[in-house]
Image (cartoon, helix red, strand yellow):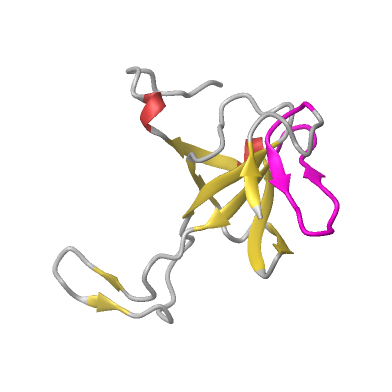
Amino acid sequence: MSVVSGDVNGVGGAAGIDMSGGSLPIRLLHDRVLVRPREDSADRRSKAGIVIPATAQMGKRLAWADVVAIGTAVRTIQVADRVLYDPEDRAEVELHSTTYILMRERDVHAVAAERLDDGLTGLYL
């Protein structure tokens, strides 16, 4: 599977996933964003050096993911950006034995990318 930006199997449009190998091509519609969750280490370490196991119960915690495809109406996110999202509000999909998360652009809390270093906060209300 490869990420395509622009054309998807010869059809113009937004970025999508090329499902070559006998499968149908996939194009995300409207404001949808397909992300791959980041596989951070299972155990975390506090600032004081205390190891926090993955099984420790914590409050609501947001997670980072890498964008692999975007829909036609997505305005502020690009493929290969890192996004911050709520892991409790997600729809998972499995493609070629890899788990992805499908969400709307409005469900993304923050975007991290080098192209955003323009001094603006990116906030709009």
Q: Quadrant of the image for the C terminus?
A: top right
Q: Quadrant of residue 11?
A: top right
Q: On screen, 73 above or below 17?
A: above
Q: Is residue 16 or residue 107 the one in the foreground?
A: 16
Residue drawn 72% across the image and 62% down it? 95
Q: Is residue 39 or residue 95 the one in the foreground?
A: 95
Magenta-tinted stretch: 12-32
70 relative to 115 in the view: left or right: right
Residue drawn 35% across the image and 17% down it? 118
Residue drawn 73% across the image and 26% down it? 73
Q: How many marks?
A: 0
User: Residue 106: where, in percent of width, then height?
Assistant: 64, 36
Q: On screen, 86 above or below 74?
A: below
Q: Magenta region, mostly helix, strand or loop?
A: loop
Residue drawn 35% across the image and 80% down it? 53
Indicate whether residue 30 is drawn in magenta: yes
Q: Quadrant of the image for the N terminus?
A: bottom right
Q: Quadrant of residue 116?
A: top left
35 relative to 12 in the view: left or right: left
User: Residue 105: where, in percent of width, then height?
Assistant: 65, 36
Q: On screen, 121 above or below 38?
A: above
Indicate whether residue 96 is drawn in magenta: no
User: Residue 79: where, in percent of width, then height?
Assistant: 56, 37
Q: Is residue 21 or residue 91 the one in the foreground?
A: 21
- Which residue lies most toward the left here? 48
User: Residue 64: where, in percent of width, then height?
Assistant: 46, 52
39 relative to 9 in the view: left or right: left
